[in-house]
Amino acid sequence: MEYYHSPDSIKDALSMAREFDGNFIYFAGGTDVQIYRKQKLEKNEHIIDLKSIHDLNSISIKDEVLSLGAMTPLDDIIKSKEILKFFPVLVEAAKSVATPVIRKTATIGGNLLVRNRCTFYNQSQEWRNGVGSCLRDVGDICQVTGGKNDCFSRNVSDTAAALIALNAEITLINSNGMTQKPIKDIYLPCGIKFHDLDNEIILTQIRVPFSPKKWWYKKLRMRKTLDFTSLTIAATIDNQDIARICLNGVSMTPILIEEPIETLTLESLIKQARKNCKTVDNDLMPLKYRREMINVYLEEFWNSIYI
Amino acid sequence: MTGAIGKPTPYIDAVQKVTGQAMYADDYKFPNMVYVSCLRSTESHAKIKSLELKKAEASPGVVAIVTGKDIPVPFGVLSISRDETAMAIEKVRYQGEIVAAVAAETIEAAEAGVKLINVEYEPLTEFFTPQDSLKTCTPDEQIHAHTKDHKNIHKTAELRFNEPEKELETAKHKQTGNFKFAGVTHGFTEPHSAVAMWNGDETLTIISATQVPHYLQKNLSKVLGLPLHKIQVKKPVLGGGFGGKSDPFPHEMIVSFLSKKIKRPVKCTFSREEVFITHHGRHPTEINMSLSCDDGGKITALDADIIIDGGAYGSFGVVTSYYNGVLLQGPYLIDKFGFRTRRTYTNKHQCGAMRGHGAVNPRYAVETLLDMMAHDMEMDPCDLREKNFLSDHSSTVGEFRITSNGIRDCIAAVRKKSDWDNRYGNLPYGHGLGVACGFFISGSALPILWNRYPQTVVHAKLDFDGRIVMFSGASDIGQGSDTMLVQIAAEELGIPMDFVQVEVSDTKTTPVDLGSYSSRVTFMVGNAAKSAASNIRREMAKAISKEKDTPAENITFKNGRIFTNDKSLDISWEEGVEMAMAGRGAFVESGFYISPKLGGNFKGAGAGLSPSYSFGAFISEVEVNPKTGETNVIKVWGAHDCGKALNPLAVEGQIEGSIHMGLGQTMSEEMRYKNGQQLNANFFDYRIPSSLDTPDMDVTIIESNDPEGPYGAKEAGEGPIHPVLPSIGNAVFDAVGVRMMELPITPDKVLKKIKENA
C-alpha cells in the first residue's frame, strides 16, 4: 500500500517521518488512531507503523527496575508474571484498558500517548458538521463551555496514571538523538496539544525505577470493559514513604499529587485533587457524579493505606 | 412428540453464519451496481430554502441524484399514519433526515458527491421534549400539518373500564408513582442494507434486511406506483432486527426508485451512525400510574397517564400508544382499569417497535407499584402477585381471551430456585432480591392492513427425491423460524430433519406471511406449517392405503419409516414417496393460519388482541455499592411460559437474550441527545452491556400447552423481557431501600437517592 509503511529500524522510521514532512502518523498498535482516521479527525496520508522495528517490545526486570519496550502489547504486560510480582498496579491499569482483543494489538506506548477525548469532538465528520464543530477541530468555540480559548478534552490514558504513580521515565528518540524524561513531564494542560513531543519523535522505552511497597488502582466507567475512563486513580507508596497519587480522565492532563505520607492528609489530598482537575461536562457520565467520585475514590485509597 | 419437536436443535443456518458463508444484504453484488450515499440534514426542524445539486452532478463517478420531490408519495407501516416520505420535501423534521441521495460508481464517489451538495435551511421552532409538543403552537411550527389543535400530538389512545379513577380516589391501599424512561434502540448487529434491481421484464427485485417483506412490497407498490405483481422482495440472512427492521424504510424506496430510473442495480448500506439515526426504537416515556388494593391484597384498580416521545414520524406509534395501556391487563386480574397515552411528535429520531413493544416501560411501573404496595402492606411481593393472577381460560376486563396460563408455575419455579422465601428481605445492606412478572401477545390477532386473507400460508412440496421443501414468507431474523419449519415438517412426516429444506421470505416464490413482529411467527406460521406438512402426510397415506389396501388412518409415519402397528405395512420413506407420486408427480400441499374472531366491540378493542398470551416471572439479585451507587446484577432467574418449547435451545436463547437486552435498558443504555443531536450514535458510547456486565442466568421453560398453539406453543421472543427490568429495580430497593423511578439506573441516580434517603 502506497501510504502504509512498516520500517524495521528507528532510523528508517525517522527518515520516513522527515520525508513525509508532517503528513504522517505513527501507528503504535493503531487501535485508537484508526477510529480518528475513520471519523476524519486524522487526515494525514502516511502511516508509519512501528510494529516491525526490532527490540521495541521487550520486557526486562533487573533489581526491581522494569524496562519495557514501548511497542509491548498491553496483553503481554498483563501476562507477565514478573511485572505482576513487582508492578501489579501497572498490570491492573493495563487490564482495565479496552477489551482483551484490542489489548493484543494496543501497545503501552500507544496507550501513554492516546489522544485526549471529548463527547463533542470524538464524533463523525457529519456529526461535527451538525453541531458546528469546535476549537479542537475547525470551529472557534468550545461546545462544552462556550469558551473561545481553552479546550478541556480529557487525557484518558489508564497506564499513564499507573506509570506516573510509579515515577516512570521514558526514552524518546528523534533525529537530534536520544532523551530521557519522567513521563509526568511530557503532558501539557491543554486539550488540543496534550503533550510536548514533536511530531517526529518516537517513544522507545519505559523505565520503572522502583517496586512500590503499596499500591491502589481504580477506574470509573459504565461497563466493566471497553469504556474509556471517566476517572482513573493509580496510587503508590515507595520505600521512602512517598505517596504518588495520579488522577486521570478528569482533566486535560494526568494530575499527580506527590507527597510524603507523613504530611499528607485525606483532606489535603482531596483539596489538591479537586483544585487541579479542570473537570467539565465532556464525558457521558454526569459531571457532578465524576467530581463526587474523586472524593469517594481518594477516601477509599486513603482507607486502604492503613489496612 | 417423537420426532424433532421439543428437542434442543441448533439453527439450520448456524454453520453458514459462523463460517461467514451466509449471505446478508450487503454481501450481494451485481454487475454494473451503483452505490448510494445519503445527504442528511444538519438541522432538527427547518425549511429547505434551496438545494443546489449541480456541482455534485458533475462530480466524477456520480450517476444520479434524487431528492424528496422525486419520490413524493408518503408511506408508513400503518395505513393510518403514512406520514413519511423517502426524503425530506420542503422541510426537515430531525437531524439526520435524508435530504438527497447520490448514486455513483463507487461508494467513495457517492460520498464525494454528497459533500458537493449545498443546502440552505431556514430554521423553525424545534420541539425536543414531549412537554413542548403538548403545547399549542403556530401552524408554521407544527412538525406535521395534520396534527389537531395546533399541537404536535400524534395520537391519543384512551380506554377506561369501570371507573378506576373513582376507586382510586377512596382506596385505602394506594400507590402512585411518576416514572421516566429514556429511549433505547435495538442495537442489532447488521446495519440496514438494501440492493434493488430493475429487471428486463420491467419488474423490481429488492433484497433488503427487513423483518416485513410483505409490508415493504405493499409500500413500494404505493410509493413507486408499481403493481404488486411487479415487485419481488427478498429477505436474505438477517443479522438481527428486534423490531428495528419492521418498517418500510426511506433507503428501500430510494434504491428501488433509482434502480428503476437508471436501470442498474443500486445498493445502500448504512453506517452504524446512520442506523442510530434511523432508530425506530423504544419511545422515551413518562408515566404517572396509580394502583390500589383491598385489605387482602387484591388489586382493585389501575390507572395510568402516559406520554411517549415519538420523534419525527409515526412508524408503529399508534399501536405503541395502545400497547402502553392495554398490555397491562395481565398477568393480574384488574376489573377497574384505565389509561390514556399521548404520543407526541418531536424533532428527534423516530421511535417505533422494539422487543416487548409498548409494554416494557409501563410494566416496570406496574411491577414497581406492586412492590411498593407489598412493602407498605407488609406482604411478600411474590404472595401479593400470586393473589392476583388471571386464571387460565378466562378473560380480562378489555375482553382479551386468556387460554393457557402457566404464570403460577413460573413464579413457583423462580421462587424456589432463588431461595426467595429464605433470602428476600434478609440479605445484608447493599444486597437484594426483586421479583416481577409479565405477559405478552403471541401474535397480533389482527393484521396491520385489514384484509380477508389468512395471516400466513405455508406450502410444503414433495418431489421424487424424497425431499420436503417448506415454502414460507416467514422472516427468520435470528429467532430460528427457518429451523422451526424444518422441525415441524420432520415431526409431522416422521422423517429426519435433513430431508427437509426451506425456501423462505421471497414475495415471488413464497406465500404471504405478514412478517416477524408481535411475536406471531411460531404461533401462526407454526400452525400453518403443521397443517401443510400434515396435508402431505394425508396425501401420502391416501396413496399408500390404496396401493397396499390398508386403512389410511392405521398408517404411522415415524423414524423414516411408514408402517402399521401390526407391521403388515412397513416401508421406507423413499418407498412411500414413490407410491405417493406414482401417476401424479411432485405435489404441493398448503396450510394456513387465520386467527379466530376475538375481542369486544368498543373502539380500541382490537389493540393487544392475540389468540394466546405468554406469561413469565423473573427474580433478580443485585449488589449495590452504597458509596458509589454502582449496581451489579449478579444473577437472574427467569421462568417463561411459552406453551411448548418446539426448540428448547431457541427458547432458552430468547430468554437469555431478553435478560441481556432488558439489563441494557435497565442499567446503561440510553439515547442521549443535546438539541436534537444524538451524543452517542455509536456502539462505543451507546452502552450495551458486555459479557462481563451480564449476570449468571438461570432459565426455566414452563410448558402450559396452549390449546391452539402448534403442539401447544406460544411466543418466547418478547414476553421474557418485560419482567427483567422491574425485577432489577425492585432488587435495588431490597438492597439499599431506594425506589428507582427512572431508567437507566445509572450509579449517579442511585447515589443521589441513597443520599436523599439517608
Image: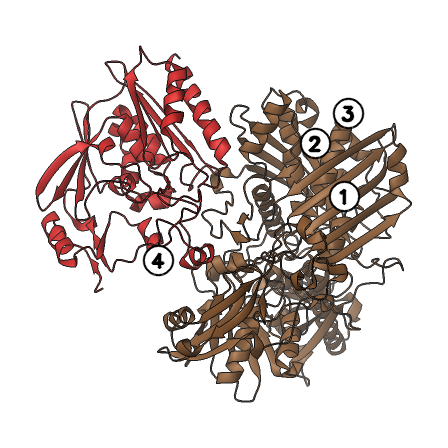
Whole-percent x, y for residue A199 in the image: 19, 48
Whole-percent x, y for residue B446 in the image: 78, 63
C-alpha distance separating marks 1 and 3: 28 Å
Residue drawn at 42 percent across, 42 percent down = A226
**Residue of label 1:** B406
Residues flagged by tags 2 and 1 on a common chain: yes
Residue B566 or A22: which is nearer the viewer? A22
Q: Colour of chain A?
A: red
**CB under 8 Å between callouts 3 and 4?**
no
C-alpha distance separating marks 2 and 3: 21 Å
**Residue of label 4:** A40
Mark 4 or mark 1, whichever is nearer to me: 4
Q: Residues within 10 Å of mark 3 (few under 14, many from 20)?
A: few
Q: Amino acid at mark 2?
A: Arg
Residue drawn at 71 percent across, 66 percent down = B81
- Numbered disc 2: secondary structure: helix
- Numbered disc 4: secondary structure: loop
C-alpha distance separating marks 2 and 1: 14 Å
Q: What chain is tagged by disc 4?
A: A
The chain whose colour is brown is B
